[in-house]
Image: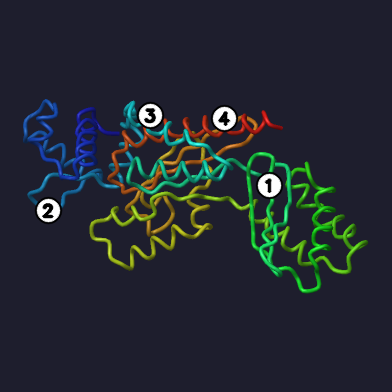
Amino acid sequence: MLTERQEQILRLIIQNYTNLGQPVGSKKLMEDGIEASSATIRNEMKTLEDHGFLSKTHSSSGRVPSITGYRYYVDHLLTPSQVDREEISLIRQSFGKEFHEINEIIQQSANILSTLTSYTALSLGPDVKERKLTGFRIVPLNNRQVIAIIVTDKGNVENQIFAIPKYLNSEDLEKMVRIINDKLIGQPLMTVYHRLRTEIPMILHKYFQTTDGVLDLFDSMLNHIFEDKIFVGGRMNLLDFEQNQNVEQFKSMYSFMKNTENLNQLLTPRDGAIQIRIGSELGDDLLSNMSMIQASYDIDGHGKGTIALLGPTSMPYSKMFGLVDVFRQELALTLADYYRSLDSFS
C-alpha cells in the first residue's frame, strides 16, 4: 500500500493526465495542493515510478501513469464524478423517441453512449430465452422469394429472406405456416425450439411429402434470436484511441469489433454492477492500451442487460464511471417503460 501523500500524488497525476493528456511535473502538483517541497514531490514520484505506478516519457519530463498506476487508482482512489444535468437531459431526450422493438432501444443506447463520450460503446439487451412466440408470418416478395418474420411477446422481431423450395407452392407454404402457428403461438421460444425438432415434423408429414426447407428456415431464425446480439456504437472512434496507430492495427481492431464471438467474450458476465478492466485484463493483445467500463442492469421479470464503454487507458475514469452508472439506470427505465407498454396491450 502507498502512503497518503503518494496516493494523493498518484491521484492528481492521473486526473491531470486523463483530462489534459500532458505529463505532470512537481510544480503542477504543488499548484494542485500537495504540501511539500518540489524536491520532496520529485522523490515521491521517483518512488512511485520505482514501484511501477508511473513512468516518464524522457529524462526531463513529468510523469505519466502506467497500467499498474491506473489499476491502483481504479481500485483504491476512484471517486465517480457527478453527471451534468445537461448530459442527463440529453440521455433522456435521446431515449424519448418512439421505439417499435427492443433491439431499436439497445442499438440506440450504444449510439447515445458513444456520442456522449467519443469512445466505442457496446450494448447487450436482456435475455430472450423466456420470450413467447406471438407470430410467424410469411410475406411474398416475388415468385420464388418470401420474407419470413418471427415476433415475440416482448417486441423481439427476427426476419429473413427465404427462397421457396421448388417442390413447394405458395398455397402449401401458407398451410404449413397456419399449422405451425396453431401449434406454437403463445409457447416460450425454448419450447418452440424443442417442438420443431420433435412433434411438428411428424404433424406436417401427415399433410406434406417433405418440409425440410420451411423447418430449416424456422430453425435458422430461432438460432439467430437466441444469439446474443451485441450492438456497437462509434466503431470508427477506435481511430482516435492511439496517436501512432498504423493502418494494419486499425484493420485488426475493426475486424475484432465486427466479430460477434470476440464481443461475446469481451462482455462475459462478471460480478458487480460496474467493473473496470484495463489493458491485458481485456484478454486480447489488440486491447492492451485500452480500458473498458462494463455495467449491468436488471429489468424486473425480463432479465439482465449490459452496457459497456471501450476507450483508451487514459480515459477520465471518474467522469466515465459516473456517466456509465447514470446511463445504465436511464436505459433500464426506458426498457422497463417499453415492457410495461407491451403488457398494457396484451
- Left or right placement of residue 263 versus residue 145 in this view: left
Mark 4 and mark 3: Cα distance apart in space: 17 Å
Q: Amino acid at mark 2?
A: His
Q: Position of residue 277 (x, y in %)?
A: 40, 44
- Left or right placement of residue 331 versus residue 288 in this view: right
Q: Amino acid at mark 4?
A: Asp
Q: In what element is the residue under mark 2? A: loop
Q: Residue furthest bottom?
A: 166
Q: Amino acid at mark 3?
A: Ser
Q: Which is more N-terminal, label 3 or label 1?
A: 3
Q: Depth check: give the residue in front, 152 or 167.
A: 167
Q: Which is more N-terminal, label 3 or label 4?
A: 3
Question: Badge 4 local density, few (<14 within 10 Å), some, or many (20+)?
Answer: few
**Residue 138 visible to an observer of this rendering:** yes
Q: Which mark is residue 58?
A: 2
User: Depth-wise, is mark 2 or mark 4 nearer the camera?
Assistant: 4
Figure quadrant of residue 249: bottom left
| Residue at the image point whose x is 46% and y is 35% from the top | 95
Mark 3 and mark 2: Cα distance apart in space: 44 Å
User: Depth-wise, is mark 2 or mark 1 nearer the camera?
Assistant: 1
* Tag 3 and tag 2, C-beta contact below 8 Å: no
Question: Badge 2 local density, few (<14 within 10 Å), some, or many (20+)?
Answer: few
Q: Position of residue 50 (x, y in %)?
A: 20, 45
Q: Which is more N-terminal, label 1 or label 2?
A: 2
Question: Badge 1 local density, few (<14 within 10 Å), some, or many (20+)?
Answer: some
| Residue at the image point whose x is 80% and y is 47% from the top | 184
Q: Which is more N-terminal, label 2 or label 3?
A: 2
Q: Which residue is mark 1?
A: 151
Q: In what element is the residue under mark 4? A: helix
Mark 1 and mark 4: Cα distance apart in space: 19 Å
Q: Depth check: give the residue in front, 8 or 123.
A: 123
Q: Which mark is residue 337?
A: 4
